[in-house]
Amino acid sequence: MNIKFDVDGVIRDLYTAVTTAFNFKIDSWNWKYKGKDIYDLAREKPEIVSEAPATKYLKVINEFTNGHIELWSHQPPEWRLYTNDWLINHLKSGIDIDIRYLTPKEKYRALQKEKDAILVDDYPNFKDYNRIILIDQPYNQKTKANIRIKTEKELKDALLVFNKRI
């Protein structure tokens, strides 16, 4: 089983970075703060992207990389340099990073084509969550998923189950 990981909401805590920098809370996927979305706010403060903290799941994910990690992330081009620096600074040293920039629809289609893959993501609007491990976030509470992760132990246990299928 091939495990793919999303970046924001899964290994990088952009939620905390944005809500702290602008002092508000996000409780839905399509939110606006003073008429601005996350991309607008990150343009105002690009350090949000590069200085966001790691999620509590990063330690577990680092354990499952085996020297290589494949990331599928939806990001605007202007974030990508910041994201690359962030990954180098936060993933365990010596890891080979393969990152694909995909929209949510492209992620879903790619997952359907790779029959031996699973995706760890926080996105709340996929067609189904058959091979998606959903990282619990305030903005995906209404999403029905087979596997919803709230703790590091839950993620570790889920990844161990999928690793045994390899």
Image: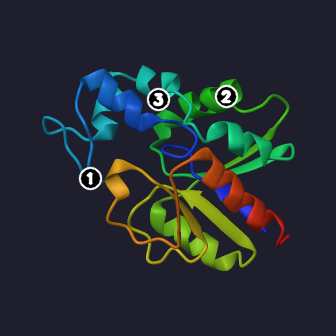
Q: Which mark is residue 142?
A: none
- C-alpha span from label 2 to label 1: 27 Å
**Viewport quadrant of the N terminus:** bottom right
Q: Earlier in the sequence, mark 3 or mark 1?
A: 1
The residue positioned 20% from the left and 38% from the top of the image is: 36
Q: Label 1: which residue?
A: 28
Vertical placement of residue 15 versus 155, above or below: above
Q: Is residue 28 left or right of residue 34?
A: right
Residue 136 seen in the current view: yes
Secondary structure state at the residue bearing disc 3: helix
Q: Earlier in the sequence, mark 3 or mark 2?
A: 3
Secondary structure state at the residue bearing disc 1: loop
Q: Is residue 76 left or right of residue 147?
A: left
- Type of amino acid under label 1: Ser
- Residue in the foreground of this view, choosing between 155 and 108: 155
- Type of amino acid under label 3: Val
Q: Label 2: which residue?
A: 90
- C-alpha span from label 3 to label 1: 20 Å
Q: Label 3: which residue?
A: 49
Q: Earlier in the sequence, mark 2 or mark 1?
A: 1
Vertical placement of residue 141 versus 66, above or below: below
